[in-house]
Structures are given as C-alpha cells and as structure tokens.
Image (spheres, rainbow, N blue to C red):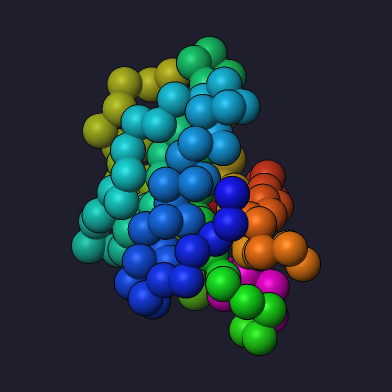
Amino acid sequence: MKLPKLWAQDVGKTGEDLAAIWYKKQGFRVVERNYRTRFGEIDLIVQKTGKWIVFVEVKTRTGNSLGRPCEAVDARKQKKLIAAAQQYLAYLPESSEQLRFDVMEIFPDKKGNERFCCIENAFTL
C-alpha cells in the first residue's frame, strides 16, 4: 500500500491507523487510542493478554527530510509518556503483564510503500 499524500494533521492519524493494524497482526489487542491525560497523550495502548501492556508512540513521516521519526521522542517526550502511562496504570487492577514503551516508526520506502520499524522497549520507567 502506498502512503497517500496527506495534510500534516492526517499523517499522524493515518500512521496510528497503520500501527494499530500492524500490532493486531502481531497478536495484540488495541485497548486505547489517543489516551489523553494532563501529562500528554499516548497514541496507542495495546495488550497481549497474559504477556504485555505496551504504550506506543507512533511517529509517521512522508519523506526523509526530517530525519528518523524516532528522533522526535526525546527525553522530554519520554517523561510525558511515562507520566501518562503511570496515570493509566493507576486505574487498572494489578496484573502480571509486563510493561513496555515502543516507538513505532512509519515512513515510505524507495517505492513509496509504508515501512514499519518498531523499536521495542525504546525506553523504560
């Protein structure tokens, strides 16, 4: 599938949709999309029951001029994501699932098709 030419606000939404599909193919269930707190927003929260709760920051690019998408997830952004995740977890019953923070990069390859690069455990609590 080719990444369509999109307006800036649509690029992020399209990337999140593609990332959700990618995680579902990996056996995860999407439990939250655009989870908002006073600390910030988590793009996706996915779960593999009995194994993982994953907080996903999706970074989508339509070209290579801005560098690697993951470079936008700096220490400040990580701190906000961790605080938002802690707030989410405060409302859950205690579980045995492991936690992780992924950064999902989506960008076009040389033919214009989307390319996924999932950086698992990109950072920790």
As for residue 71 lying within the magenta part, the answer is yes
As for residue 86 lying within the magenta part, the answer is no
Q: Residue 122, image x and y in percent?
A: 66, 54
Q: Nearer the viewer, residue 91 or 64?
A: 64
* Residue furthest to the top: 50
114 vs 110, left or right, is: left
Q: Quadrant of residue 6?
A: bottom left
Q: Nearer the viewer, residue 92 or 120?
A: 120
Q: Nearer the viewer, residue 105 or 85?
A: 105
Which residue range is magenta in the image?
A: 67-73
Q: Residue 59, image x and y in percent?
A: 53, 63
Q: Quadrant of residue 26?
A: top right
Residue drawn at point x = 47 percent, y = 71 percent: 5
Q: Is residue 78 visible?
A: no
Q: Residue 12, image x and y in percent?
A: 41, 64
73 vs 95, left or right, is: right
Residue drawn at point x = 42 percent, y = 47 percent: 17
Q: Is residue 44 visible?
A: yes
Q: Reply above or below: 7 against 60.
A: below
Residue drawn at point x = 62 percent, y = 70 percent: 69
88 vs 1, left or right, is: left
Q: Reply above or below: 63 against 38.
A: below
Marker count (numbered): 0
Q: Residue 76, image x and y in percent?
A: 49, 74
105 vs 9, left or right, is: right
* Residue furthest to the bottom: 65
Residue drawn at point x = 32 percent, y = 38 percent: 32
Q: Reply above or below: 53 against 16.
A: above
